[in-house]
Image: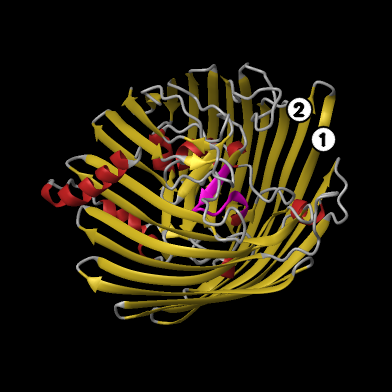
Amino acid sequence: MIVRPLATATLLALAVSRSLPASAQDPATGLDEVLVTATRTEIALRDSLSPAQVIDRDEIERSQATSLQQLLAGRAGIDLANTGGPGKQTSLFLRGAGSNQVLVLVDGVRIGSATAGQPAIQDIPVAQIERIEIVRGPHSSLYGADAIGGVIQIFTRRDRGAPQPRLMLGAGSNGLREAGAGLGLGGERGWFGADLAFLRTDGINACAGTAAGWGAGCFADDPDRDGYRNRSASVRGGARLAEAWTLEGSVLHAAGYNHYDGSWADYSETEQRVYSGRLRYAPSARLALQANAGRSYDDAQDYGPSGHAGGLRTRRDQASLQGDFVLGDGQSLMAGADWLEDRIDGTTAYEVDHRDNTGVFAEYQGRFGAQQLQAGLRHDDNAQFGGHTTGNLGWGWHLGGGLRLSARYATGFRAPSFNDLYYPGFGNPDLAPEESENLNLGLAGEHGDWRWSLDVYENRVDDLISYDAATFLPGNIDRARLRGGELTVAATLGGWDLSAQYSHVDPRNRSDGPYRGHLLPRRARDSGRLDLDRRDGRLAWGATLKAAGPRWDDAANSARVGGHLTFDLRAEYALDADWSLLARVTNLLDQRYQIVDWYNQPGREFGLQLRWRPQAR
């Protein structure tokens, strides 16, 4: 199996880590990072009863990733399906749950198309990201619909301290050009930051399809380069209005211009805009109240030989009130309410073009000696599918010696999208939400210079929405069982920073009918990555090994897409205190592979970057 090198490396790291000398840096300090997404409150990453991971700005820059897909590929629980390289439509699977079953937030604001039901992660530039929190497993009891597989929250850049300008210029294979500039500053009374970024690539031939024949991929015979451009800007700031009052806000704008292979349209212009604001009142360490408001846009317009071929625009408005209460030593309660409204506009006329949802929620967290307890409950009232109640119950036991055992049970649901409900001629307004029940068991350890975690889970999803051949309409006819596990290892050993992640998922169709027992399409059963990095004085270098096993591209399990393994190298040299030169080669072995049937992935690519970030003197 192609992922065996990753699994072997992960297990080897566990076996030999005690025998290697520890460096001065303790990798376990990463667990002291604050995690917000898992509980809607600030907790230490090490205290989360939900499997979670944080990718900070240092790791983003060290990886030299040019896209969010590159940054996320192979991480625990995550699998991606991309249709031809940078800027092309990308589906994200989390623990086998599909893109429309994974909630993606930007600065606390829900993003994504309400018509298709999934976010355009291919258009979110890494240049604007400060950190990413990945929380695996259902979290509908906190966020409502669409969090069956988990939640991924992206935070735009934040700046503190003296004025900090920055500049980046880059170039690479396939006509890659990139640039970025920004400024951040802040003090006790306020902070401000702004960034601009640009990326352009000539791309590759995205699709190997043909113009005729069933199952011919993109149904076009167009063997040319399919380029992509992305322009983005972000502005954010905050102020302490009084001793107990703080106000902050952010704006992210990203525009994508994408060429692709298609029979009726072959060029699209997309726009993602996210606005967020928060007012917080914290008169003491025992009480905090906050009001949040946000708006996101997802605008996609397609063009073909005859001009404009159609488009849709989604607007999502949301607001919430939340209170955080410390009840006693190690005891806290979070409670609140939120509201969401979706609106669509475009060339396709829907019978219903807006809907709203109101939710109320509460979650308790308690610590009793070596025991942790977590319990949450939420009720949603939706204009289309009525009321729905979800909950979670978690328990943790610190066994001593750096070990912790945990268990978490949670329910989740996904609301039908506008396409599911109202697409002209193909919608079904009587659809009910998809529902899920999930159990996660985890064991984690911290041992001086290394840490590891092992999680196993089973997620049963009922009333899956899919095409009903009897009615020619979508219906609640399917069931699925998502069963698997993840092993992660992180350590600093002999001057090397090691991170290994291995995931196994068995996403089975449990519906009655000819496909019962088949694997769900476009999910690799095995995937993972291994990262090694080292710094010696002015020079830093590293390598990443990413792998995914074979997958099926259809529900019938008749179209097999082979697995792949890629090897990346990177280096960074500090020319002086302010300037750095970076170089990378991705897919060093030039493996030719596909993730989605008929759609190519880039071969070997090279890249150079020059970065300027003056140090405070």
Q: Which residue is mark 1?
A: 310
As drawn, the residue found furthest toward the front would be: 514
Residue 58 placement: quadrant:
top left
What residue type is disc 1 on?
Answer: Gly
- Give the residue displayed 41% in from the left and 40% down from the top: 549
Q: Is residue 429 left or right of residue 210?
A: right
With respect to residue 379, does 491 lie above or below? Answer: above
Other-residue count near label 1 (Cα within 10 Å), few / some / many at <14 / 14–19 / ≥20:
some
- Give the residue displayed 59% in from the left and 47% down from the top: 555
Give the percent coordinates (x, y) of residue 507.
50, 54
Of circles 2 and 1, the one toward us is 2
Q: Secondary structure at mark 1?
A: strand
Magenta range: 91-100
Give the percent coordinates (x, y) of residue 18.
14, 52
With respect to residue 115, does 340 lie above or below? Answer: below
What residue type is disc 2 on?
Answer: Ala
Q: Which residue is mark 2?
A: 265
With respect to residue 613, does 403 lie above or below? Answer: below
Q: Is residue 179 visible?
A: yes
Q: Are marks 2 and 1 in contact (CB under 8 Å)?
A: yes
Give the percent coordinates (x, y) of residue 600.
54, 27
Other-residue count near label 2 (Cα within 10 Å), few / some / many at <14 / 14–19 / ≥20:
some
